[in-house]
């Protein structure tokens, strides 16, 4: 993690103007079709990549924009207003790129990160059925083979499965005896032996978070990220995707709110109860936006420090994700009340209403996140790692 955030950068106002052009020309016009047909937002990601947004936090020598967490959060939020599916795919791509940039080497940077400017994308594959919502735990294990490693296991949910150009995969190290002995690998998505499931969901129908099976997949030694066992440190310091999830659900809430306001301005806004509901929604959204900026400032400071992510800041990220996803659902309910039967009909508000439901269960699920938050409140150890050795 070197100089990406030290270079001169455009103002947030300029960032918003620039990203809005792609949203208005490409992302928003595609949103309903992506939902209706369950289509992966390839065109959206290609447009974002060619303009540099898929490399937003990377240095310019790698084709990045060298921007910071303020800009990243704003971009995710703006995308989510129009298409939450695209925002989630985008968020997981940024998470994958930061793992490679933060813990990989120059060879990996040039082979996997530079092509992002061509519209290529990556994603993270962590979740396993056996460990459920604790997506940072793995029962699977890599095995040694000539020149590298062999991977044989399934990941239960992987955003962009079947469409990403590479997967950043977490698994137990070959000689692992404890859950915390993890390693990360970069897997080329073109390899034979990668099978992906179908994605037919209630909402965010374009993000394709289906299972992915790795069957005798070879990973060259050069695509081990860091050293064996580095995975524990990566898990404990990874934050871009959790922050991005909070920003995505904040943007979803704003998108829903804007639809409700447009309806109220034409019809129901003359009723006091409707105005009160809209006011309640706006208060929730404004508080989230302010909190997003505060967290972005703290993440920028952390990034520059080179220190491990503090437990307190990690907990704050969980809190932000929980509150943002639940606010999106509260605003969705308010908006249905405001629009009545018109909002329930197939259309933008109905689509965003369905999309908002995903935030509650998306890892870490809100119930699991609350448990981690609660442990810190009462002074119980918040370690992510079980103490017992593998049986």
Image: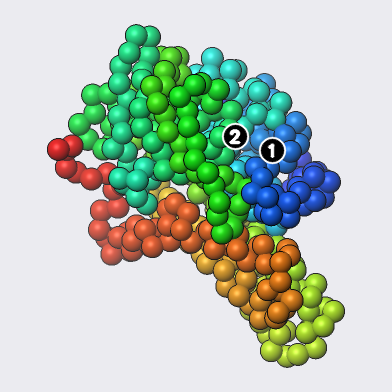
Left or right of 334 on screen, residue 216:
left
Circle 1/circle 2 CB separation < 8 Å: yes
Q: Is residue 220 above or below residue 86?
A: above
Q: Residue at horizontal 71%, vertical 71%?
A: 345
Q: Residue at horizontal 75%, vertical 68%?
A: 259
> How was the colour assigned to the protein in this rendering?
rainbow
Q: Residue at horizontal 42%, vertical 22%?
A: 217
CA gap between label 1 and label 2 equals 8 Å
Residue 302 screen position, x and y as percent:
50, 42
Q: Is residue 297 above or below residue 165?
A: below
Question: For the residue labelled by badge 2, is the local secondary structure a helix, a strand or a loop?
Answer: loop
Q: Is residue 65 visible?
A: no
Which residue is at the far bottom? 272
The picture quadrant where one finds residue 4 is top right
Instruction: Determine which residue is flagged by label 2.
Output: 163
Query: Quick one: label 1 or label 2, which is nearer the N terminus?
Result: 1
Residue 360 screen position, x and y as percent:
48, 61
Instruction: Determine which residue is flagged by label 1.
Output: 42
Residue 223 screen position, x and y as percent:
46, 19
Can you say which quadrant of the picture contains the C terminus? top left
Image disc number at residue 216 = none
Which residue is at the far left? 391
Q: Residues within 10 Å of mark 2 (few under 14, many from 20)?
A: some
């Amino acid at each position: 993690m070197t100089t990406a955030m030290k270079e001169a950068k455009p103002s947030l106002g300029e960032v918003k103007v620039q990203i809005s052009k792609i949203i208005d020309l490409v992302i928003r016009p595609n949103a309903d079709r992506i939902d209706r047909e369950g289509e992966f937002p390839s065109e959206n990601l290609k447009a974002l990549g060619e303009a540099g947004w898929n490399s937003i936090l990377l240095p310019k020598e790698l084709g990045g924009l060298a921007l910071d967490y303020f800009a990243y959060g704003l971009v995710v939020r703006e995308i989510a207003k129009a298409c939450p599916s695209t925002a989630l795919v985008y968020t997981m791509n940024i998470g994958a790129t930061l793992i490679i940039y933060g813990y990989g080497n120059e060879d990996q940077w040039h082979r996997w990160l530079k092509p992002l400017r061509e519209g290529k994308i990556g994603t993270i594959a962590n979740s396993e059925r056996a460990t459920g919502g604790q997506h940072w735990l793995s029962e699977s294990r890599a095995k040694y083979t000539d020149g590298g490693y062999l991977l044989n296991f399934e990941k239960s949910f992987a955003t962009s499965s079947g469409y990403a150009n590479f997967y950043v995969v977490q698994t137990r190290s070959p000689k692992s005896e404890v859950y915390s002995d993890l390693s990360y690998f970069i897997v080329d998505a073109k390899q034979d032996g990668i099978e992906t499931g179908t994605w037919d969901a209630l909402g965010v129908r374009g993000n394709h978070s289906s299972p992915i099976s790795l069957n005798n997949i070879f990973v060259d030694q050069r695509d081990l990220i860091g050293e064996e066992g580095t995975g524990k440190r990566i898990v404990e310091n990874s934050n871009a995707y959790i922050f991005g999830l909070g920003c995505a659900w904040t943007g979803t809430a704003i998108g829903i709110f804007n639809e409700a306001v447009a309806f109220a301005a034409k019809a129901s806004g003359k009723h006091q109860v409707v105005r009160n509901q809209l006011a309640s929604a706006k208060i929730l959204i404004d508080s989230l936006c302010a909190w997003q900026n505060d967290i972005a400032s703290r993440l920028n400071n952390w990034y520059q420090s080179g220190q491990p992510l503090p437990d307190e800041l990690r907990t704050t990220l969980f809190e932000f994700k929980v509150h943002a996803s639940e606010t999106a659902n509260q605003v969705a309910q308010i908006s249905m009340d405001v629009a009545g039967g018109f909002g329930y009909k197939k259309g933008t508000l109905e689509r965003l209403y369905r999309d908002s439901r995903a935030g509650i269960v998306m890892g870490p699920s809100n119930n699991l996140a609350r448990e981690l938050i609660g442990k810190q409140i009462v002074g119980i150890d918040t370690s992510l790692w079980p103490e017992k050795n593998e049986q």
